[in-house]
Image (cartoon, helix red, strand yellow):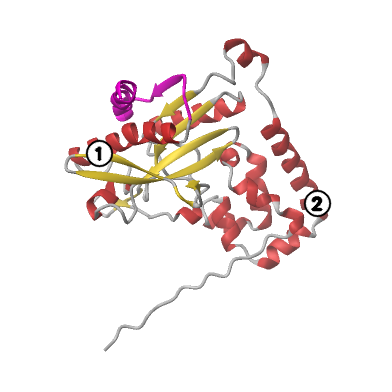
Amino acid sequence: MRKATQFWLEARPRVPEAIAGLEALANDLFYSWDHGVRSLYARIDLRLWQKVEHNPKLFLRRVSQDRLDEAAENPAFLTEYRRILSNYDAYVASEPGSEVLQALNPETSLVAYFCAEFGFHESFPIYSGGLGILAGDHCKAASDLSLPFVAVGLLYQQGYFIQSIDAQGHQIATYKCHSSDELPISPVERDGKPFMISVPFPEREVHARVWQAKVGHIRLYLLDANTPENSEEDRALTLQLYGGDATTRISQEMLLGIGGTRVLSELGIRPTAWHINEGHAAFQILERCRQTMA
């Protein structure tokens, strides 16, 4: 007996023109440190906002059309929406302050910040602890100062785990996969095709698709090994943060350090300062030496 083919159909609501800026706000991690932006979604549907774990992009996929239409016709909501959107537009348009200009020239200086995890917000689970929160705060501060700054990391499918304790007191780790459609990221493209890089591994090449996230004034590039060009084993390199055995960990570090450096090089991005947040991206140094000697 032939197995029936299943089709999935998702009906997404249309954001009214009067509040269309909600989509731009949902695609900028500026929301992760601006309470006003997050409050807009909560005002539309608080219960759903809590259910989607404060994820603006997922919220706009799940919210009812009636709720959006009501918000677009609510004078009080529109007043607050316009105020917050105006503040956001002013933030994005702001220039580096005198303290930045005294220290460096934004036209000729650029900091490249490599890290294995970035903790911006619970809706973007590519972190597990203090290192990620530190990296996220560095990025937020760099954005607030309008520093010439670019960040590089890995895009994990599962990120951190959800912890529960059973009756015997044992920890149970539950992982949840996250779709790119639900995250504040967009694919980097070249000539209308996904931009990819490859990293030499023993007896093979590992390929990675490149995504980008807008973090206020700065960009975060993320490498994703879950692509058909790779074997199942290599696709799992970006499955979990700090997952697998020692071989997996060193492979993740090669992908981050070598692959991340190649991403910047192929995009024509020329950093003048390179920051390695702990040793996870140490292969960056070797790749830069290789490029210099080539």
Left or right of 20 on screen, residue 159? left
Gap between marks 2 and 1, in whole Å? 57 Å
Q: Residue at x 39, y 30 (%)?
A: 131
The quarter holding residue 292 reads top left
CB contact under 8 Å: marks 2 and 1: no
Residue 13 on image: x %, y % = 63, 65
Going by the numbered disc 1, the residue's amino acid type is Pro
The quarter holding residue 176 reads bottom left
Q: Secondary structure at mark 1?
A: strand
Going by the numbered disc 2, the residue's amino acid type is Ala
Residue 256 on image: x %, y % = 34, 35
Q: Which stretch is magenta?
A: 269-294
Q: Which residue is mark 1?
A: 200
Which residue lies most toward the left here? Answer: 203
Which residue lies most toward the right here? Answer: 75
Q: Which residue is mark 2?
A: 76
Confirm whether the magenta stretch covers residue 285: yes
Is the residue 59 above or below the residue 145 in the image?
A: below
Residue 171 seen: no
